[in-house]
Amino acid sequence: MSSNVVQVRSRQLQAAEVAWFAPICNGDTDYLGQMPDRYKSTWQNASEILLTADKLGYRNILCPSSYQVGQDTWTFASAVAPLTRQINLLTAIRCGEVHPPMLARAISTLDHILQGRLTINIISSDLPGTQLDSATRYRRSGEVIEILRQAWTQEEISFKGEFYQLQLPSEPVTPYQQNGGPLLYFGGYSPAGVELCAQFCDVYLMWPETEERLLELMQNMSAQAARFGRQVDFGLRVHVIVRETESEARAYAQKLVSKLEEEKGKEIRERALDARSYGVARQTDMRSIADSEGYAEAHLWTGIGRARSGCGAALVGDPDQVLNKIRRYMDMGIRAFIFSGYPHLDECRLFARYVLPQLPTMSLPQALGRIPQQLPMTPLGAAPRK
């Protein structure tokens, strides 16, 4: 396969999975660099954002993972799941944190609670208090994923690897979703990370960069997936600021950073476990090529990265400008979007008012046939295997 071809598993689908973000790891604010008590990550704050996104029609929501700040991801997701109506939960797991057979059971349990509305964000960062090189962490993640797949699709887990040696029945951990279990979303840029996604995962998540650089990432991933006889879908994690006029949106972007002290921004950027990753370095590089107002290309503002490790840019503009930018991404082959904004509840409502009704949306697990049709709620382990 040519290295300049983008192969997308769901390209024929004329819709996108539009998701929001649940700030369970703190970081919500109305001025970057500040942490008002009213925005701190609490059950009340985070669940209100998630349930609002559910009511407004978002199709998925990312529940991230961080040791330093915020709430436990899995506990939060399990508590909020029965309160939701139609939204999927994109729940982050750190590979190696939980013994894989127990993790498989936990995922299957939540998948049944949600009746198939569970998706998984695979994280390979260092565990708190430990430090492994990138390649080793990705090898461990690969073993965890292989064990999960065996647990979800076979009668027995039979695995001998570098980190895990297992021989036990898998019957207690059958998920609600069929055809392989919950979809695995993954974001990573190192060669070992790209190979992990190409071999095992379903959706390759990227952070915001110029369209040219995103296309290069997609071409590379397509070529790597083809080595394993596979295709993946592509997703974009990006912030958004949409207002009735472009001038209002750009003014709000500048307001967000108007009280930011550079030393404080550096402290925030460097406190994450993955602060020195290749992906974070690429976000830093985006700021270096931006213009004097922080725009790396039309409507892509990198100012958020001054006070945030990881996803560090936002789509900024009026409703038509933001919508057209998203459509350009969809034309490239991106089928999943994870949006967010500051403060998260307000921006969730604004995006739903100005842009979401104009986008054809879908749930990727449904579109890919993972959720049984007309199958009633069943006890854990009772859904048929395929």
Image: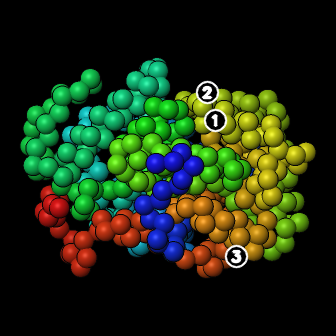
Q: Considering the numbered disc 2 on the image, is that residue within a helix, a strand or a loop? A: loop
State left or right for residue 340 relative to residue 168.
right
**Foreground pick, 209 / 312:** 209
Residue 61 seen anywhere in this rendered image of the structure? no
State left or right for residue 246 relative to residue 29.
right
Q: Are marks 2 and 1 in contact (CB under 8 Å)?
A: yes
Query: Marks 3 and 1, how far apart in space?
Result: 30 Å
Snapshot colouring:
rainbow
Kind of residue sitting beneath label 3: Tyr
Q: Are marks 3 and 1 in contact (CB under 8 Å)?
A: no
Residue behind mark 1: 280
**Foreground pick, 301 / 204:** 204
Kind of residue sitting beneath label 1: Val
- Residue 374 x/y as whole percent: 24, 79
Q: Considering the numbered disc 3 on the image, is that residue within a helix, a strand or a loop? A: helix
The crowding category of the residue bearing disc 2, from other C-alpha atoms within 10 Å (few below 14, some 14 to 19, many at least 20), is some
The residue sitting at 55% across, 60% down in the picture is 334
- Residue 54 x/y as whole percent: 49, 70
The residue sitting at 58% across, 30% down in the picture is 277
Numbered badge on residue 276: 2
Residue 336 seen anywhere in this rendered image of the structure? yes
344 lies above or below 16: above
Query: Marks 2 and 1, how far apart in space?
Result: 6 Å
Mark 3 / mark 1, whichever is N-terminal: 1
Q: Residue 384 lies in what quarter of the image?
A: bottom left
Q: Considering the numbered disc 1 on the image, is that residue within a helix, a strand or a loop? A: helix
**Foreground pick, 338 / 85:** 338
State left or right for residue 173 relative to residue 19.
left
Residue behind mark 3: 354
